């Protein structure tokens, strides 16, 4: 677990006269173990902010720290984060177990440690009886859970969710939302969750970072954001 600190973060795409500034000095601190939802209309910069935390996008000015360490110059793999995307991109020829174990094998984590981590993730996600199946033998919801399992076994300090619910039908969306809540209850890992859906933001967030046109307009609990005097 770790805090995430944004210190006057600015993002410009491109350079020179064609440069387009899309984040205009965001400062905020996400506390250890907090679940924060970044919400706002399409194009306001949510995904850019998240990708800068992940190291998938360069930070033009300012700093982002994870657990007190400035990460501006760290590679994604050095940042102790795991990202959950909307399309789960599982390896089709591998079993559920191997899908979850793959990244750890590459990192030369010992086999019994891999087994223990996968079993723990499978228990939380109720995937224990599916570990030998292939992705095509799973429902959409189960596949989504395997994708989350791949993030969990990394034991990151931070989870980053990039609109993971937006391509799902209503039933699956509700189910996956409950799973994400359970995940946070059980593991308490600091999480940033991006969505353009206000209802989703309100139901999931401990605090909401409300973005508009590259600026953070509010940062507070759903009550604070929606019931301001
Ligand atoms: P959101 O996630 O809120 O929809 P984004 O962070 O994707 O917003 O985009 C913010 C702004 O940055 C938009 O104007 C978008 O067009 C622009 N943008 C996003 N990615 C790139 C890129 N790779 N190159 C240039 N402009 C980009
Ligand atoms: P490994 O993670 O062991 O390097 P992978 O093939 O799983 O091997 O990942 C390749 C790259 O993608 C690595 O840099 C890894 O850190 C990164 N990566 C993999 N899965 C995730 C994830 N869920 N979130 C963030 N980064 C990831």
Image (spheres, rainbow, N blue to C red):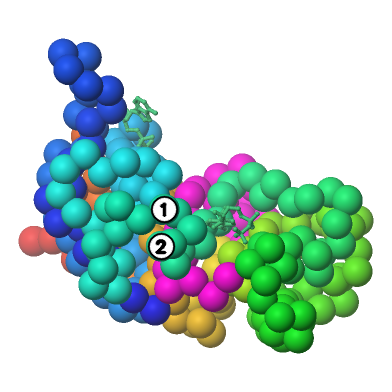
Magenta segment includes 173: yes
Residue 26 visible at all: no
Q: Residue furthest left?
A: 229
In depth, the one of 83 and 210 nearer the eye is: 83
In this view, 86 is above or below 84:
above
Contact flag, marks 1 and 2 (Cβ < 8 Å): yes
Query: What is the distance, in whole Å, between disc 1 and disc 2 at their CAs?
Result: 7 Å
Locate residue 117: give its quadrant.
Answer: bottom right
Q: Would you say residue 111 is visible in this rendering?
A: yes
- Residue 132: x and y in percent read 91, 69
In the rendered image of this protein, does residue 182 appear above or below residue 216? below
Residue carrying label 1: 75
Q: Nearer the viewer, residue 186 or 8?
A: 8
Q: Residue furthest top?
A: 17
Q: Is mark 1 within 8 Å of ligand 2?
A: yes
Which residues, given as a range, are shown in magenta?
A: 154-176
Question: Where residue 85 sits in the image (x, y, percent)?
Answer: 56, 50
**Residue matched to label 2:** 79
Taking the image in four quarters, ligand 2 sits in the one at bottom right
| Residue drawn where x is 42% and y is 44% of the image | 56
For label 1, count other residues whose C-alpha is less than 10 Å away and answer few (under 14), some (14-19) or many (20+): few
Graded by Cα atoms within 10 Å as few (under 14), some (14 to 19) or many (20 or more), the crowding at tag 2 reads many
Say which of 55 and 32 sits in front.
55
Quarter containing the C terminus: bottom left
The answer to whether residue 13 is above or below residue 77 is: above
130 with respect to 70 (left or right): right
Tell me which residue sits at (34%, 47%) in the image: 52
Residue drawn at x 86%, y 62% as measured from the top left: 95
Q: Residue 43, how many percent across, how many down?
A: 34, 32
């Amino acid at each position: 677990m770790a805090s995430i600190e944004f210190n006057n973060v600015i993002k410009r795409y491109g350079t020179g006269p064609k440069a387009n500034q899309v984040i205009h000095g965001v400062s905020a601190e996400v506390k250890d173990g907090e679940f924060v939802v970044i919400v706002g209309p399409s194009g306001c910069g949510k995904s850019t902010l998240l990708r800068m935390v992940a190291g998938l996008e360069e930070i033009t000015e300012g700093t982002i720290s994870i657990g007190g360490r400035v990460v501006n110059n760290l590679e994604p793999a050095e940042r102790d984060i795991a990202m959950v995307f909307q399309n789960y991109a599982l390896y089709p020829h591998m079993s559920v177990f191997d899908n979850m174990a793959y990244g750890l094998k590459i990192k030369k984590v010992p086999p019994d440690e891999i087994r223990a981590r996968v079993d723990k993730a499978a228990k939380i996600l109720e995937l224990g009886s599916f570990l030998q199946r292939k992705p095509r033998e799973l429902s959409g919801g189960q596949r989504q859970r395997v994708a989350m399992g791949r993030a969990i076994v990394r034991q990151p300090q931070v989870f980053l969710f990039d609109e993971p619910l937006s391509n799902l039908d209503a039933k699956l969306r509700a189910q996956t939302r409950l799973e994400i809540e359970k995940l946070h209850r059980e593991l308490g890992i600091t999480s940033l969750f991006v969505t353009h859906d206000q209802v989703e933001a309100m139901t999931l967030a401990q605090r909401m970072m409300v973005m508009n046109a590259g600026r953070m307009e509010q940062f507070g609990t759903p009550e604070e954001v929606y019931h301001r005097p």
